[in-house]
Amino acid sequence: MKTLIMPSVRKQQGVTLIEMMIAMTLSLLLLAGVVVIMRGSKTSYDTQNDASRIQENARYALDFIGKGIRMAGYFGCSGGIPNNTANNFTVLRGRDNLTVGASSVQSDLIRVSYMDTNQNAFAIIHCPPYAAYRNYLQSTGYTTEADYQAASVCPPRTDFGNFKIAVKATPLLAGAGTSGSPLNLAAISPPGFVISGDVLSGDILVAADCAGSDLYDATLNGDKLSLQYRITGQSGLVRSYNNAFRGQAQSYGSELRQLRTWRYYVAQVNRNGRQYFALCRDNADLLTATNCQDNNELIEGVENLQIRYGVSNTANNTLQYMTAAQVDATVQWDNVVSVRLTLLMQSTDERYNRDRDELTYPLDASEPNNPYDPPDDHRIRRVFSSTIVLRN
């Protein structure tokens, strides 16, 4: 009798511990490689993004300050500084090495003044030139130019519409000038004239023509504007220089515009739980504390501003760059023909996935051995420089 032999049951097979450890090790190596690649990509992205923002902020800051500096000293076609020496008026001044907040940063400040050509501008209509309005003036009784020049007041404005068409607009409310001035606002009834533009009480206005310019304080009563001469306190438009039209008041076609005075400086700002450096602008006096309010902040990330003034020496035809203190000491602000700005920009975010910044930065080309040493934090910094030629 034969004995049946059952086939043996195959043994169940699985992953051994060694195989599992090898698989885990390989997976960890692959995962570590992915993490390294992702971390490198994130670091590279952050670096490029921060560098781009630094460059963009620097371009904006230099352009913003540069526009103000290029306008410094513009007061109409005469190019003359307003006759306001009694109030120590200057068109360009600076200060050196101001301590920025609670930091150890020493930054410079610049202050510029000019007549605003973009806003709140309107023409002042005075006695018009005889040649331009010969036909009309002859019809009103001024047969010759001598008759017109000898007149003590502007011609009667019986045909006022033609004047308005010729000059396109006028801020005068009514009436003609007096013998004391071709345009005496105090003599106009009701006093003052209607304005077009955002002029507020307390604003400083520049009245300018091709002979020169003067400064006035504005007082607004409703929509009527009155002026007060800043030297003598006299009301109405007056003129202190002799080569104006008939030696009185501003000449025909002069302009009345706001005086813009801006200070540019670096401040340490504490806002919304953050502390950072920013470029600020306000209209305070040169020696007033640099207190950057919300509406004064222009752009963050400006850690330091160094300013040098190019002073022209006409005797030997040379150009020397000086600090504000050196220009003050030599009383050469009128000889400043250019301004060199140097900005130290920093990334707005401190990223701890990058190395510490342990570099020093030369901010003054004339003193390369005296560099600025910022705190060794985890930010990116770059130096940007621009030289601006004064137009006026």
Image: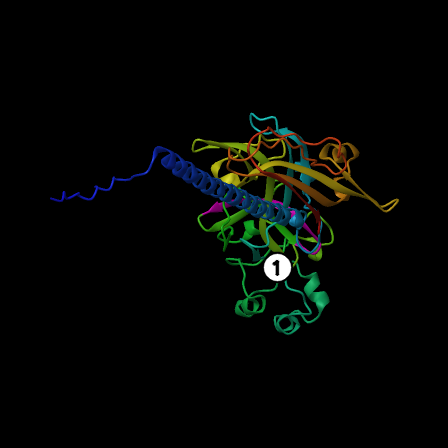
- The percent coordinates of residue 201 (x first, y second) are 50, 43
Residue 213 covered by magenta stretch: yes
For residue 215, say whether it is visible.
yes
Q: Quadrant of residue 273?
A: top left
Secondary structure, mark 1, is: loop
Residue sitting at the far right:
316
Q: Quadrant of residue 357?
A: top right
- The percent coordinates of residue 77 (x first, y second) are 69, 56
- Residue sitting at 47 percent across and 43 percent down? 38
Instruction: Give 218 or 193, whichever is nearer the viewer.
Output: 218
Q: Which residue is mark 1?
A: 126
For residue 183, say whether it is visible.
no
- Residue sitting at 57 percent across and 59 percent down? 176
Residue 226 covered by magenta stretch: no
Instruction: Give 166 or 50, whichever is nearer the viewer.
Output: 50
**In this rendering, position of residue 21 left or right of residue 88:** left
Give the quadrant of the N terminus.
top left
- The percent coordinates of residue 36 (x first, y second) are 49, 40
- The percent coordinates of residue 358 (x first, y second) are 63, 30
Residue sitting at the far left:
1
Q: Is residue 11 above or below residue 243?
A: above
Instruction: Give 391 or 119, whichever is nearer the viewer.
Output: 391
> Looking at numbered disc 1 in the image, what kind of residue is underneath it?
His
Label 1, residues with CA under 10 Å away: few <14, some 14-19, many ≥20: many
Q: Magenta region, mostly helix, strand or loop?
A: strand
- Residue sitting at 38 percent across and 34 percent down? 18
Residue sitting at the far front:
1
**In this rendering, position of residue 42 left or right of residue 64:** left
Residue span colored magenta:
209-221
